[in-house]
Image (cartoon, helix red, strand yellow):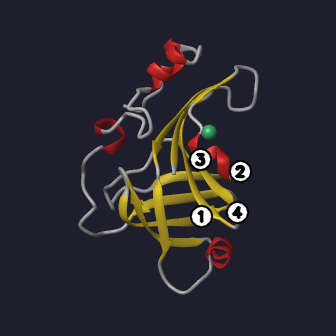
Amino acid sequence: MVQKHRASALHYDFRLEAGGVLVSWAVPKGPSLDPKVKRLAMAVEDHPLDYARFEGVIPEGEYGGGTVMVWDIGTYELDGDETFDEALRKGRIVFTLNGKKLKGGWVLVRTRGRQWLLMKRRDRDASTLEVTRAKPRSVLTRRLLAGIARDEGGDVAKAETGDPT
Ligand code: MN
């Protein structure tokens, strides 16, 4: 699943369920459907499974304070014979997504430390569509980030800003 999260900066939290937790990366520019585009993905702490459907406002002053949207949700399968832990340890996770927005082949490759790259693989789901702009709404509630902030008592002006241009 992917959460769009306007904290101190806008980013997309990309989370894969494995070993009873959500293994997580923060992707500042969000995923790209274009296989030529490599998106920085910073490994961040695992999150509990029940966080996958969290949408709302984290109070300012708390860690990650700001507005959170469930931007995509679905299932994934690992490609190849490795376990998730083996792939994570080697720094190369090859998988197929069946989300509402993101589909087909993807890969996460570690470059150094906590830095990874998220890339679309070449297949019929690859495209040059700017998916974060073309499909900006919550998959759970169809709200925009500012709408979530408005409904949940968050900072609407902040939620409206920070989209990469
Ligand atoms: Mn986040």
Label 4 element class: loop
Q: Which mark is residue 111?
A: 1
The residue under label 2 is which amino acid type? Pro
Near-viewer residue (129 or 110): 129
Label 3 element class: helix
Crowdedness of circle 4 by 10 Å Cα count: few (<14), some, many (20+)?
few
Which of the two discs, 3 and 1, labels the residue nearer the N terminus? 3
Q: Is residue 143 above or below residue 52?
A: above
Q: Quadrant of residue 89?
A: bottom right
**Residue at point 57% right, 43% down?**
53
Give the side of residue 8 with respect to residue 131, left or right.
right
Give the side of residue 17 with respect to residue 40, left or right.
right
The residue under label 4 is which amino acid type? Gly
Q: CA distance from mark 3 to mark 2?
A: 8 Å
Q: Which mark is residue 48?
A: 2
Circles 2, 1 touching at the beta carbon (< 8 Å)? no
Q: CA distance from mark 3 to mark 4?
A: 12 Å
Q: CA distance from mark 4 to mark 1?
A: 26 Å
Label 1 element class: strand
Label 2 element class: strand
The residue under label 1 is which amino acid type? Thr
Q: Comparing marks 3 and 1, which lies closer to the viewer?
A: 3
Q: Is residue 95 above or below residue 28?
A: below
Which residue in the protein does label 3 denote?
A: 52
Q: Comparing marks 2 and 1, which lies closer to the viewer?
A: 2
Which residue in the protein does label 4 denote?
A: 20
Q: CA distance from mark 3 to mark 1?
A: 26 Å
